[in-house]
Image (cartoon, rainbow, N blue to C red):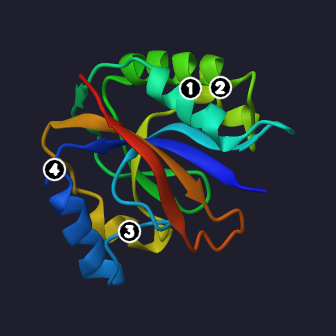
Amino acid sequence: MKKYTIILLPEKNAAKEVKELRIKYTGQKFTDALPPHITLRRSFFMRPNIAEIELKKAIQSFSMKKITTTFSKVEKMGENTLVLLAKNEKQFSAEHEKITTLLNPISVAKRPEWDKKNYKPHLTIFRKPELLQKIKDFTLPEITFDTLCLYDIDPSPAHAFADKVICKKLT
């Protein structure tokens, strides 16, 4: 069974600093096989008897404007994730609500407890909490997120792959 996620990608080259920081400390520019992003809809599965084409149609029909944001300093989220929280949470949360509502008839969230009121828009830096002291002052300039993407992601804890299914530019 395929597992999906929906992410927002920044404008070209906007996440260069994140990639450089990741390479400096881990040797890799991706975390969980994904480029720097803000997750709009966390991992989910298709409902039985729903084809992937229905999901693609839903993504194509989804209307959203670009979002520009600044970020907090690096914080720990959960057990092992270092993130930058988006400062204009309300704007991202409103879009998260819209996409979640649109997809509810055809999908099931893997961890529904992280949806809706518990959604926290963030950019994951590392899954290495031991690096917090080394990077605690890292921040980013204002970034515009201008692309919405659906990815098929590795359903195992290894997060070994993320295959782009469809992307669309935001207006």
Q: Quadrant of the C terminus?
A: top left
Question: Mark 1–mark 2 contact, CB under 8 Å?
Answer: yes
Seen in the image, is 9 located left or right of residue 57? Answer: left
Name the mark on residue 30.
Answer: 3
Distance Cα–Cα, label 1 vs label 3: 27 Å
Residue at the location (27% across, 78% down)?
23
- Circle 1: is it few (<14), some (14-19), or many (20+) Cα within 10 Å? some
For marks 2 and 3 on the same chain, the one whose residue lies earlier in the sequence = 3
- Circle 4: is it few (<14), some (14-19), or many (20+) Cα within 10 Å? few
Quadrant in the rendering for residue 166: top left
Residue 133 x/y as whole percent:
34, 67
Seen in the image, is 68 located left or right of residue 81? Answer: left
Q: Secondary structure at mark 3?
A: loop
Q: Which residue is mark 1?
A: 58
Name the mark on residue 103.
Answer: 2
Seen in the image, is 18 located left or right of residue 79? Answer: left
